[in-house]
Image (cartoon, grey):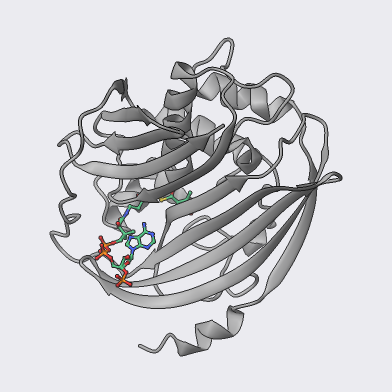
Amino acid sequence: MSFDHLKDWIGREEEHLDVATAAPLAGLAATLDHLDPPWRAGEIPPLGHWLYFLPKAAQREIAEDGHPHRGGFLPPVPLPRRMWAGSQLEFVAPIRTGEALRRRSTIGDVQHKSGRSGEMVFVKVLHEVSTEAGLAIREVHDIVYREAPKPGEAPPPSEPSPDAVWRRPMVPDPVLLFRYSAITFNGHRIHYDRKYCEEVEGYPGLIVHGPLTATLLVDLFLRENPGARVTAYRFRARRPLFDVHPFTLCGSPRVGGATLWALDHTGQIAMSAELEAA
Ligand SMILES: CC(C)(COP(=O)(O)OP(=O)(O)OC[C@H]1O[C@@H](n2cnc3c(N)ncnc32)[C@H](O)[C@@H]1OP(=O)(O)O)[C@@H](O)C(=O)NCCC(=O)NCCSC(=O)C[C@](C)(O)C(=O)O
């Protein structure tokens, strides 16, 4: 299978406007189990910008996986299973609640790779979120498309995990996953349609959203450091987490920030992250 034509999408751009309203933040605080979230007053918390610029595709434009059909802004990758592979973010300036927002997105790269788990295509999307005062967030989002499942497929093992100073057990029940899908208006069926997950994508349960795990890891840091200003964050999703098992959020402080990771129920690293704070 050739993927060369997908390179034509590199450089494609789109722009969206929104307003950093307070209502979705109340939903995020509730989903993260906070009565009084440890965020800086009057500002969007780190990763809170994912609650804005929600996908607007009409129902008729939705594909089998619950995302819009590919071939518009995102390239028409002919591999069926889409996942959030990771992101690298710089929080350049705060966004205050109520501010007008603009997001310019560009396809930065499209790469075919053969990994331990089979054929994959990585699409790199660069986002720049600005307020009237200028650039607020620079983000690189890595999307991975995987081939169809093979019988007996299992994720490759991770490297050993370090000792954690902070630990928080999580039960990723379907209500948590539903509430995060709802506040991010994410129609991806892998997060709520168990039959689709098992029978079409070959996974053993509903998949925990990569952005939810990334947000829970930042939340672990903020619970320990209320009001801290996060200046940069990068994470990599290494193994999927499923709703059929608990997982553990872990972290250790270091000079200038923290190292954070999520362990699945077998003790393997499912997500690893580095956070910088001022
Ligand atoms: C990503 C998978 C398939 C790689 O699978 P693998 O382990 O087989 O890969 P590998 O053999 O370790 O590496 C192969 C190549 O890929 C690269 N690579 C490897 N991993 C990454 C990464 N994360 N980010 C960027 N690059 C990566 C790696 O560097 C290497 O490149 P090289 O050949 O040039 O050396 C595997 O690690 C995996 O399954 N991770 C878990 C993904 C996951 O659970 N995501 C969250 C849930 S999906 C989601 O939230 C969806 C949402 C919100 O609805 C939505 O659609 O946006």
- Whether residue 77 is visible: no
Res. 125 image quadrant: bottom right
Tell me: 89 left or right of 210: right
Tell me: 72 left or right of 22: left
Q: Quadrant of the C terminus?
A: top right
Q: Ligand 1: which quarter?
A: bottom left
Tell me: 198 left or right of 236: left
| Name of the residue lying farthest toward the right | 132
Q: Position of residue 86 (x, y in %)?
A: 43, 53
Q: Position of residue 210 (x, y in %)?
A: 43, 45
Q: Quadrant of the N terminus?
A: bottom left
Relative to the observer, which residue lies in front, 162 or 220? 162
| Name of the residue lying farthest toward the top | 35
| Name of the residue lying farthest toward the front | 255
Q: Position of residue 16 (x, y in %)?
A: 77, 56
Does residue 7 lie above or below 62 as drawn?
A: below
Tell me: 222 left or right of 154: right
- Whether residue 223 is visible: yes
The residue under the point 33% across, 75% down is 113
Q: Position of residue 139 (x, y in %)?
A: 59, 53
Does residue 105 lie above or below 175 as drawn?
A: below
